[in-house]
Image (cartoon, helix red, strand yellow):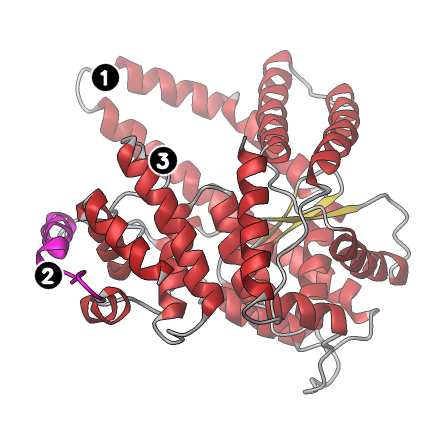
Amino acid sequence: MKNRLLFTVIFFFSAFLANAQKEFIPIDTSAFAMCRISLAEEYKGKFTLINKNIVSSTTAQKTIIKGIYNEIQENFFDKIKQNNFICEEKLNTYLNGLLQEVLVKNGIKETYRILLSKDSDANAYNTGNGTVVIHFGLFLTLENEDELVFVIAHEIGHQYLNHVKIEIESFAKLSTSEQVINKTKEIRSKKYGKATMAGDFLKNIRYENYAKRRKKEFAADSIAVTFYKKTLRNPKAGVTILEKLDSSDSEKDSLTIDDYKFILNKNDFKVKKSWFEVEESLFKKYDNEKNIIVDSLKTHPDCLSRIKMIRKYSAYNFTDKTTISKDFFNIKQMSIYQNLINLYDQELYGISLYEALKLYKKDIENPILKNIIYVNFSKILASKTTYTINRYVPKVDNKKNSESLNRFITLINNLKTSDIQLIINNLKS
């Protein structure tokens, strides 16, 4: 059913754009069903081989390792079932060409695979089985192809150094260590303060893991510099992409009450200030709570220190010359709109709408953005009717969300179905 809905939406987008402007054509999803089957079969074989080769010194550790791998594998298969990976021949060929460039120039014979996911955050990861996954949202941050190649070299570095396998085995050893067993017994023996002791102990382990993860990132960067040098691409790419990733968590734009009035006030519909009042009182509730240090939980921690290291080990002059191939230019050009569609396809209607509105306030005549806003509001109206809106719109969260995002969520929650219907009618006109 979901695939049929997606096809309808893509057809609607394509038909709409044919009469509007030619700059954006959504990714063709017609091959996704066959791709899902072939990916599932391919990774079933990969995971069977990994599970077969699990070795550990104790039965307890082996059980933990198997459990972790099983969880990773189930999550990956879920992504395949949900069409999370973009199976478009031209895109896959392009990315595989960049992957092979790094592998061939460095004489790496092992089999690697690169996949493009629909995820909207600026990230990439290595699964531990030779697969590099690039999030589509990374293209919103990338400025040139050299930066993309450095990211690929970095993820190859994680695989080359066997970081996933080492981290899983280290966790298994720690979980069954005398230190953890004794500390667990000590906490259980206490009459009072068990929760505090357990929390402090887990926090110490978390920071210890952060220190280890930090070392792995430095190691992956170091070997990535070596791999990347042999491509003869712009050596500055490692620095520039890390500078962008360092600030990627901070929101670059926002939506104010006046913005909503500018975008939505039309005909009989008028934005009411009272629709935002609940959001303000919820913010006050969390004002005095301490936040966890953000950097301690980053996937790619301490970018500034890593930048300094890359500058040190890049033993040749930086230049301003960068590579922007035709393929990269095409992906970059369509990335903003395609990312909104990817969010829609993942049923993240709230975030898709929020990101589209931020763009629309600066380009109020844009027919592509207007259409994306329309289909997301339509889905939100349907979810309001069936009381399932929490599945598609995130919750107010002052720790994780920006003030602007919380304001948007509060507005959506306070809008009545009749209000949303009026907005939809205005978007049609």
Question: Is residue 122 shown to the viewer in this render?
Answer: no
Q: Which residue is mark 3?
A: 391
Horizontal side of 143 relative to 47 (left or right) equals left
Residue neighbourhood size for the residue with mark 2, other residues' Cα within 10 Å, grouped as few (<14), some (14–19), many (≥20): few
Residue 394 % position (x, y): 32, 44
Query: Looking at the image, do the residues carrying marks 2 and 1 touch, with CB atoms under 8 Å apart?
Result: no
Q: Which residue is mark 1?
A: 190
SS under mark 1: loop
Magenta stretch: give its range.
Answer: 267-286
Question: Of residues 338 and 312, which is closer to you in this image?
Answer: 338
Three-letter amino acid code of the residue under disc 3: Arg
- The Cα atoms of the two marked residues, 2 and 1, are separated by 52 Å
Q: Which residue is mark 2?
A: 273
Identify the residue at image location x=60%, y=65%. 18
Front: mark 2 or 1: 2
Question: Of residues 240 and 24, which is closer to you in this image?
Answer: 24
Query: Looking at the image, do the residues carrying marks 3 and 1 touch, with CB atoms under 8 Å apart?
Result: no
Horizontal side of 248 relative to 380 (left or right) equals right
Three-letter amino acid code of the residue under disc 1: Lys
Identify the residue at image location x=87%, y=52%. 108
Residue 377 % position (x, y): 35, 50
Horizontal side of 374 relative to 11 (left or right) equals left
